[in-house]
Amino acid sequence: MSAPRVVVLVEGESDRVALRVLAGRLGRDLAAEGVAILPMGGVTNIRAFASEHGPQGLGRRVIGLYDIGEERHVRRGLAAAGLLVDPVVGPVAQGFHACDPDLEGELLRALGLDAAEAIVDRAGEGRSRRLLAQMPAQRGWSREQLLRRFLGSQSGRKARYAELFTQALDLDRAPRPLLDVLREGAA
């Protein structure tokens, strides 16, 4: 494969999986379009990734997806990599879109809690989810808080459910930040 014309920087594997699955559901072949999605292993690595893959003479565009609470890291990292961030508009002007509060929150909101819990049950992990809800530390938590804790309680679970949740989404309710990043990648 030739060098990508667009590099999408994402915080982790679950973001990459969700974008890849959503693109496929929308009939897009990102590799054929010259779009590469790179998990950075955390937003604090954005400066290094943006510097390495940035447009400095490479003829490629760097865009991305991040959690809204990490915007200060995104602004600082992009600026350190030489990608100017508009002080008013923010990273969106560079093609970086924020999930509120994060990917899991966007997917749970788009699916609804009933549908998300049903997906967990069909995946064979309903018992684990229910056991977590019965633990003293989680008593009194909302269903969303419990699902979010469940998703983060085992290595690889966020990526697994990013795929399952994105496959189950009504495309009319697909999270705006994911759609915006995919739109930017096609431009």
Image (spheres, helix red, strand yellow):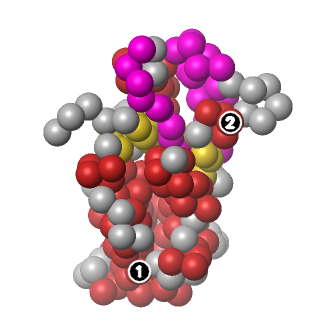
Could you tell me residue 162's position as x and y percent?
39, 63
x and y, in percent, of residue 24 in the image: 33, 67
Q: Position of residue 117 (x, y in %)?
A: 45, 82
Q: Is residue 39 left or right of residue 84?
A: left
Q: Is residue 174 left or right of residue 150?
A: right
**Which residue lies under the disc numbered 2?**
93
Residue 11 visible (yes or no): no
Compared across the picture, whether 21 is left or right of 114 comes to: left
* Label 2 to label 1: alpha-carbon separation: 30 Å
Mark earlier in primary sequence (2, 1): 2
Between 158 and 127, the residue placed more toward the observer is 158
Q: Is residue 128 left or right of residue 140?
A: left
Where is residue 91, by image quadrant?
A: top right
- Element type at marker 2? helix
Q: Residue at x 41, y 80 (%)?
A: 168
Q: Is residue 71 above or below residue 52?
A: below
Q: Which residues are magenta?
A: 57-84
* Residue 65 makes an appearance in the image: yes
- Judged by depth in the image, the label closer to the viewer, 2 or 1, is 2
What is the number of the mark on residue 168? 1
Q: Residue at x 51, y 37 (%)?
A: 63
Residue located at (66% from left, 40% from top): 92
Q: Is residue 176 above or below residue 61?
A: below
Amino acid type at image mark 2: Ala
Quadrant of the image for the N terminus? top left
Q: Nearer the viewer, residue 19 or 155?
A: 19
Mark 2 and mark 1 in contact? Answer it, CB < 8 Å.
no
* Disc 1 secondary structure class: helix
Looking at the rendered structure, the kind of residue marked 1 is: Ala
- Check if residue 80 falls in the magenta segment: yes
